[in-house]
Amino acid sequence: MTHLRMRKLGSILLPVLFVYGVGGVVHAQGSEWEKLNGEVVGLYKQGNYDQAIEVAKKALQVAEQTAGSDSPSVATSLNNLAMLHQAKDEYAEAEPLYQRALAINEKVRGPDHPDVATSLHNLAALYSAQELFDKAVPLSKRALAIDELAFGPEHPRITTSLNNLATLYLAQGQFVQAESLYKRILRIHEQAFGPNHPAVAKSWDDLGLLYQAQKQYAEAEPFHKRALEIWKQALGPDHARVAITLEHLANLYRETDREKEAQEVAEQAAAIRATQ
């Protein structure tokens, strides 16, 4: 199975867009930076990347002038500008921006601060988008270690880092490593939120996709069905997440030549999509 298909099966690593800054807003920068940063976020959500880049550059300039070149607000602006370039597949432009943001966070916060883990995650996401897994995996492992140290090995806050690392393993076909992490995520979510929480449903679905990727269809099917049951109970039968899991089941049925069942669940998913 190719890297591209594997990445479609798993949860894609996505960088984090900071709204008000790493560790809070520096008062000296004033409301102008806050306003610009909020505008960047709005334009990003609209998909207006070109205009967002221009505003993000201005926000970076304001942060540097008012808070200093090594301030958390500069790291935020660098991160957001990098993310916008990444959204346009401008990886060469994004990489040095992410790296500078990481360096600022390490200097200001210390090497083991959760903000550093977030910067590491963002840089790993950039490398993952380019399938540079040899670069992405060490960053993701370090981010996980920082989060475990900060929050503890069973805290829900670490599941994002666990999921990111699992996704990288899945993309490379390293199924044993990915399975161990996905099962750990499921256990943490069940302990923290109970068995019928949406986060638990996602864990069941992710494990189903993992088994499906290995053509272990008998193992995958009950995981998707359990996820579907939780989604319906927690979010309602017409929620987009229900449609996604129905589509996963439809793909599984097609891959096992169960065309009638595939058509039935695919039609259910399409009906939900039509209402969105």
Image: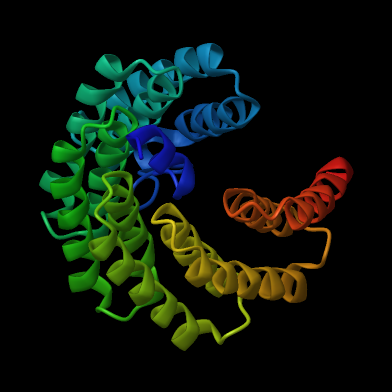
Horizontal arrangement in the rendering, residue 39 relative to residue 262 (left or right): left
Q: Quadrant of the N terminus?
A: top left
Tell which of 129 and 174 is nearer to you: 174
Question: Quadrant location of residue 74?
Answer: top left
Horizontal arrangement in the rendering, residue 157 relative to residue 52 (left or right): left
Colouring mode (rainbow / by chain / secondary structure / one colour):
rainbow
Question: Quadrant location of residue 268?
Answer: bottom right
Q: How far from the left and from the top, in percent, is residue 150?
A: 22, 71
Residue lying at 69% horizontally and 55% vertically, measured from the top left:
258
Tell which of 256 and 155 is nearer to you: 256
Q: How many marks?
A: 0
Q: In which quarter of the image is the C terminus?
A: top right
Question: Quadrant location of residue 141?
Answer: bottom left
Tell me: residue 5, above or below residue 162.
above
Tell me: residue 191, above or below residue 211.
below
Tell me: residue 50, above or below residue 217.
above
Q: How far from the left and from the top, in percent, is residue 270?
A: 82, 44
Residue lying at 18% horizontally and 30% vertically, measured from the top left:
100
Q: Please indicate, yes or no, whether residue 14 appears anywhere in the rendered image.
A: no
Residue lying at 22% horizontally and 51% vertically, measured from the top left:
140
Q: How far from the left and from the top, in percent, is residue 8?
A: 47, 40
Tell me: residue 53, above or below residue 19.
above
Tell which of 190 and 112 is nearer to you: 190
Tell which of 261 and 94 is nearer to you: 261
